[in-house]
Amino acid sequence: MTDFAASKALFHLPADVIYLDGNSLGPMPKAAIERARTTIADQWGEMLIRGWNDADWMSLPGRVGNRIARLIGASDGSVVMGDTLSIKVYQALASALALNPGRKVVLSDNGNFPTDLYMAQGLIDSLKQGHVLKTVNPEDVAGVLGDDIAVLMLTQVDYRTGRMHDMAAITKKAHALGIVVIWDLAHSAGAVPVDLTGCNAEFAVGCTYKYFNGGPGAPAFIYVRPDLVEKVRPALSGWLGHEAPFAFTRDYTPAPGIERMRVGTPPVIQLAILDAALDVWDDVTMADIRAKSIELCEQFIAGVERRCPMLDLVSPRNAELRGSQVSFRFDDGYAVMQALIARGVIGDFRAPDVIRFGFTPLYLDEGDVEAGINILADIMENRLWDAAEYKKRQAVT
Amino acid sequence: MTDFAASKALFHLPADVIYLDGNSLGPMPKAAIERARTTIADQWGEMLIRGWNDADWMSLPGRVGNRIARLIGASDGSVVMGDTLSIKVYQALASALALNPGRKVVLSDNGNFPTDLYMAQGLIDSLKQGHVLKTVNPEDVAGVLGDDIAVLMLTQVDYRTGRMHDMAAITKKAHALGIVVIWDLAHSAGAVPVDLTGCNAEFAVGCTYKYFNGGPGAPAFIYVRPDLVEKVRPALSGWLGHEAPFAFTRDYTPAPGIERMRVGTPPVIQLAILDAALDVWDDVTMADIRAKSIELCEQFIAGVERRCPMLDLVSPRNAELRGSQVSFRFDDGYAVMQALIARGVIGDFRAPDVIRFGFTPLYLDEGDVEAGINILADIMENRLWDAAEYKKRQAVT
């Protein structure tokens, strides 16, 4: 049984803060500071260029990728780190389209995170090969699958609602129709059990600054199904995806396996911090995380619905259909979230009217959730959000 | 007059090391450790998600971009940071091709860094629009320019030889023929004076872990000529290049200006470290850097040629045609470099037979250069490189 009191002790959480936004940016594992210091002072400072060999920076994207792989049901050597999630979406989609050249439709849902759709549109516009990006409501995806679709590209857990797709069932149906499948695990990885091998999808991508607590701007990951990877010729064919980067040959030859999905020089310092953050998972099981996450979400929903009837639950009520986050709708949701933050309860706001809370058992317990409910209830019951200072929007929330 | 003793004091250099590889990875500015610590502990740790506003992480790519802009002769608001140089090459080339749709030839030279050519090839292969990548010898570029060429994509300073293109003259000639020009400043930025505004090129890209000392995996930069940027629709159209990322609209609308070249979430910690590293430049002029760099290079060439006649100078003898690095050719160059490194003189090796030395006045002086010459001469005169231990190749050098 996972000892969540022990895992909580591995994080720094500011005094007087209840952090319900780890689904946007995970808090700082205490080990991050020292790992950054040693990477900078002992490795960069002392080894200089020799760090690529002596500290094995060069293999860091693959080594960290293997640690992520174990947490998303993927095999060793099937995941590599680098770049941002947007770039990894582009890589996956470009590769997926090339695997299904006779078809022209990219299907997604309108709950997908915008950057996935933006990157798809940018790729399609550049290719000028007649592709179209089609989006439907999340619940309609399975029903509209057809043999005209080249690629199905979905984010498993909807960033606004927390609604969760059934990866295995949708992938199976898509495959029966000859569709290549890409899963964005941004809100799944580290939040819910993911079984990439079992689901058999061709590609998956995700970020590491949410539930993996890698820090602001931590690098992304990409998974390619092992039986397929040798067929993939990366559109973003950078030198560190080359089979022999230091041969400096004129022509690109992809590296064997997942290493070909690397592009440029990896962000060594951020990767090292992420590597330290992943130590937290050594004594944690995803099944325990999921069970506890459901408990916390249920506690929050029940408490908020009882005490704040003016808030409408946006997330699925059925825990099986929900990720590790809970959202409510309220016209003045922006002001409510500002009032909450002013009181130390940090969630986030998603336009136009959604307030969103993430539940992360690694560092949140029932007492935190209860305290969060109490503050939210106080704000709603006493209309504390209805103050000008909370309605003035900042550029970023 | 720049006080180079003062700038040298801002860097940590290991005892008994003469570092002639800042052209590959700059050494650690002492301020990097503390800036990393405050970014991690005080910002990420205490502000959590609020750091995007409260520490203004969101504008960091533009703010640091402006600092780089001043060092490469570009105007405020014309440079933005992010991703890797490989990704920025792809962005620039995709945009450049779209500006010249009637032409199909991308011209580069065979001294360009391989990842530039690999990324170009990957883009061309994906587009399937009949583009071809053509390379010629560096000295032949000006002579083969013609009105069939869509984009001229060059690295100003050749990574192996240090040979330097005349940016202004080549750009002028290319423009007269209707060619869009991209300069890769990987080995120029921070090494030699660059006048992007004067040269009038459409695009420039570069990295920051070399002469800007941003640390391993520090982010890249991209420049787009200000009069042109509103016409550029990024192929890599990520959400942070959107005009309103937090509106979460379904369709991509590029941000005004250079911000549209942003893609995904920026690597905040590495950007902060780079920002600290750039403080070194506050009291430095590029003209002084260049003058001192030439002095150090001349000193090195003269000393090595006098004492190591078996080494053949690969770099241009004329300082005006050379960047801030010097290379020699030797059949057993790999072993020579290993022997040098074993003695604390760190340069690097570039296949098949080039040993390369970077000269960076910010932290190198005449005494360092003299000591480096003495050790190299000892190794060559006494055939110390001719030992099995130095010939066994490592994966990375």
Image (spheres, coloured by chain):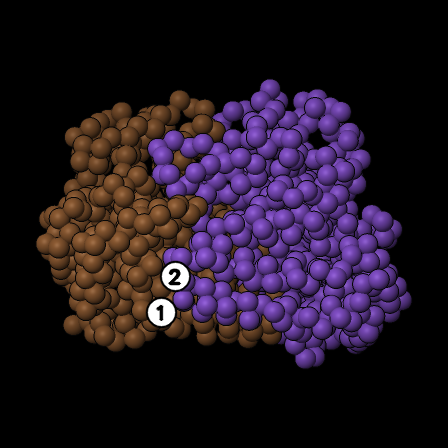
Chain colours: A purple, B brown
- Find residue A172 and report its horizontal and vertical position in percent: 77, 31
Residue A234, x across and y down, in percent: 51, 34
Kindly tell me whether residue A155 is visible in this rendering.
Answer: no
Asked if the residues shown at circle 2 and circle 1 are in contact, with their CB atoms under 8 angstroms apart, the answer is: yes
* Residue marked by disc 1: B14
Q: Quadrant of the N terminus of chain B?
A: bottom left
The location of residue A225, given as percent across then percent down, is 65, 35
Residue B125: quarter of image: top left
Q: Chain of mark 2?
A: A
Secondary element under disc 2, as helix, strand or loop, is helix
Question: Residue B75 at what x, y percent from top left?
Answer: 30, 57
- The Cα atoms of the two marked residues, 2 and 1, are separated by 9 Å
Crowding at mark 2 (Cα within 10 Å: few <14, some 14-19, many 20+): many
Please say if A305 is above or below A165. below
The kind of residue on which mark 2 rests is Leu
Question: Residue at 66% of width from left, 62% of height from top?
Answer: A279
Residue found farthest to the bottom? A15
In the rendered view, does B53 fall on the left or right side of B104?
Answer: right
Chain under label 1?
B
Q: Tell whether B54 sits left or right of A176.
A: left
Please tell me which residue is depicted at 83% across the width and 70% down the height of the picture.
Answer: A366
Say left or right for B86 vs A36: left
**Going 57% across and 28% down the picture, which residue do you hit?**
A231
Instruction: State whether residue A307 is above or below residue B332.
Output: below
**Residue at the image point whose x is 73% and y is 75% from the top:** A384
Residue that numbered label 2 is attached to: A48
Q: Label 1 is placed on what type of residue?
A: Pro
Residue B144's label in the rendered image is none
Front position in the image: B125 or A114: B125
The local secondary structure at tag 1 comes to loop
